[in-house]
Amino acid sequence: MPQITVDYSASLDEDFDRRGFALALHPLVVETVGARLPACKTRTRRTDDTVIGDGAADDALVHVGIDLLAGRSDEAKARLTEAVVALVPRHIKPAEGRVLHVSAEVRDLDASYRSS
């Protein structure tokens, strides 16, 4: 069940420990919203074209989307997004002059969701 998608700027390729992030994220999801660890699935997607603001700076972004089965409270979802936003920078090497924009969102899966 938790279907996790991480979109990240291509400029982070060498600096973002994506596997380490996923391995740290899964227990966090389990602890915060009661998911099962074997059910956590994370995929990362490099975003080649990223423009932030007026495009003048060499900023980078990471957006984490977490889709869960319905039933979690808004408060639990908010705690999870806050924890995810705090976790991301721990897995990215700092770079001089780069501003990192991190966001996260937790959504309910549609009732039609099935998994095997």
Image: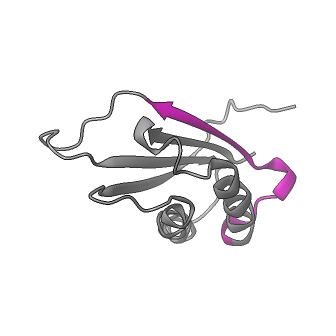
Look at 34% across and 55% down and name the residue there.
Answer: 101
- Residue 47 sits above or below residue 11 on the image: above
Residue 21 percent across, percent down from the top left: 64, 57
Label count reads 0
Image-quadrant location for residue 72: bottom right
Image-quadrant location for residue 30: bottom right
Residue 33 is a magenta residue: yes
Does 50 sit left or right of 56 as displayed? right
Quadrant position of the C terminus in the picture? top right
Look at 14% across and 42% down and name the residue there.
Answer: 56
Residue 105 percent across, percent down from the top left: 47, 52
- Residue 41 sits above or below residue 45 on the image: below
Look at 76% across and 59% down and name the residue there.
Answer: 35
Please name whichever residue, 19 or 111, is drawn nearer the observer in this view of the structure: 19
Image-quadrant location for residue 29: bottom right
- Residue 26 sits above or below residue 40 on the image: below
Residue 2 percent across, percent down from the top left: 70, 48
Please name whichever residue, 111 or 29, is drawn nearer the observer in this view of the structure: 29
Residue 61 percent across, percent down from the top left: 38, 47
Look at 50% across and 33% down and name the residue there.
Answer: 46
Does 39 sit left or right of 44 as displayed? right
Please name whichever residue, 29 or 23, is drawn nearer the observer in this view of the structure: 23
Tell me the magenta residue range.
32-47
